[in-house]
Image (spheres, rainbow, N blue to C red):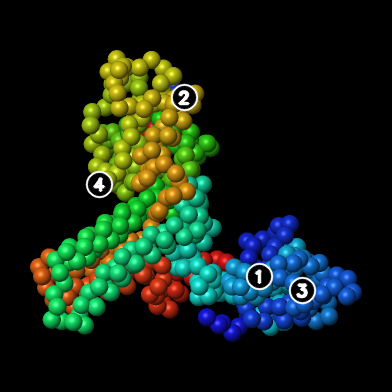
Amino acid sequence: MYIEDTIVAVATPPGTGGLAVLRVSGPAALAVADKAFRPGRPGAPLPSQAPSHSVHHGHVVHEGMVVDEVLVTVLRAPRTYTREDTVEVGCHGGACVTRMVLEAFMAAGARHAAPGEFTRRAFLNGRIDLAQAEAVADLIHARSARAALAAGAQLSGLLSRRIEALRESLLNVLAHLEAHLDFPDEDIDPETGARLEARVVQALSGARALSDSARHGRLLREGARVAIVGPPNAGKSSLLNALLGVERAIVSDVPGTTRDTVEDMATVAGFPVVLVDTAGIRESTDAIELEGMRRSRDAARAADMVLEVADVTLPPPGPGPMEVGAGTACLRVANKCDMAEHPGFVGHPGWIRVSCRTGTGLEGLREAMAASLGGPGGGSHAEEVAVSARHQDALRRSMEGMTAALESMRAGRALDLVAADLRVAWNAVGEVAGKTTTEDLLDRIFSTFCIGK
Ligand SMILES: Nc1nc2c(ncn2[C@@H]2O[C@H](COP(=O)(O)OP(=O)(O)OP(=O)(O)O)[C@@H](O)[C@H]2O)c(=O)[nH]1
Ligand SMILES: [Mg+2]
């Protein structure tokens, strides 16, 4: 795809820093750089004369004035991020100086880029597909090592390859059916029919496996919500602080210290999590405390995981009165194991012993949390597929198409009906990788990017 204009943006975060990097991309990138950049020594090449993938020292000039001393990297198409001619400018990282360098390049003929426009060009020019483009944003926004690894896997094409395999299978079946549609007198022989059906069944289960990874994808992208619940004084706030590594919530020996939910983000064994400390549940007539307990119950219902905390020196609580969402993992945590256990707890399995005071058992708790959040595959994180809500929606529609096609096949309905449903499925699968997209969808996706990416 040939895009006419040349764009520029600061690719590094705003604010002060040692360096900032500007990116210029488009057919006139080198010509723009020739105008805005003056080589540091006489006779040194201008960007348009420089070989690809070479670095040059010099100055950015604007209206005859030297704006900054910079290093310019010349990258010629197609071996660049956007597949267009690209110039990267490393300048000093002050907010003002960066702005002045940006203005010099705009005065030289580049337009200020929209959010995600560089990545959008990489997509439009066919260097990456849409799932990979989205992975760029996921990688930048990843809040934990594990989320970053999953985004990296998607960026390298892990999901795209699975999607491509699904499309291949469906296309293969479609081609068979359509060949037969040209000869309406001939029936598909039973053996071929069974083979085609088996292919669709296999594609359907492949799509389902991908779609099932959406929960895992959400946990990695947004972080799992972990509600810490239990009776007053059990040590819920102490546990929040211990898992966060900072004294975030007030801890005291007065039961009923925490009255409102307190939440903060942390990383547990590579997973991003949002930890929510709650008010202890007990009999009360105090209006504020009752409201706090209502919020505790809401937090438990909305959580991906509940940590039920009990004081190990007291009798173990019965099955909790807390209502949790379907599929919510529950871990029972017996706190204060630095003190003598109540006889009721001794030998009681199913409680993870910790002491927030000494730190004993916290590592084991973290591991248990990670194992329970672990998602499919478990093993190698680099092989982790974790689709997004958008992917899941496209996969759902593709599964509907495949299911309808299978029904028609089994009922012996006309082949063109089967083909129409499979085409729906094929198109929907293609949306994941952006084989079938609309401008609207692209606008929506790339508007979530930062400028300069
Ligand atoms: N010995 C011992 N004491 C602890 C431990 N963890 C917490 N405590 C003490 O238990 C008391 C209650 O701790 P909190 O963390 O405030 O308990 P909570 O569950 O948040 O209580 P509420 O907010 O009132 O519901 C405090 O005095 C803590 O110092 C522990 O591991 N060992
Ligand atoms: Mg508390």
Which type of secondary structure does the marked residue at label 1 adopt? strand
Instruction: Tell me if the residue at label 2 has its CB under 8 Å from ligand 1.
Output: no
Distance of label 2 from label 1 (alpha carbons): 50 Å
The label shown at residue 360 is 2
**Residues at marks 3 and 4 touching, judged by CB atoms closer than 8 Å:** no
Among the two numbered marks 1 and 4 on one chain, the one whose residue lies closer to the N terminus: 1
Disc 2 residue type? Thr
Among the two numbered marks 4 and 2 on one chain, the one whose residue lies closer to the N terminus: 4
Distance of label 2 from label 3 (alpha carbons): 61 Å
Pick the quarter of the image with the C terminus: bottom right
Which residue, given by chain and number where applicable, does mark 1 sit on?
23
Distance of label 3 from label 4 (alpha carbons): 61 Å
Which residue, given by chain and number where applicable, does mark 3 sit on?
50
Please state which of the two labelled residues, at mark 3 or mark 4, is closer to the viewer: 3
The label shown at residue 326 is 4
Disc 4 residue type? Ala
Which type of secondary structure does the marked residue at label 2 adopt? loop
Distance of label 1 from label 3 (alpha carbons): 17 Å
Give x and y (percent) for residue 370.
41, 39
In the rendered image, the vertical position of residue 363 relative to residue 403, given as above or below: above
Disc 3 residue type? Ala
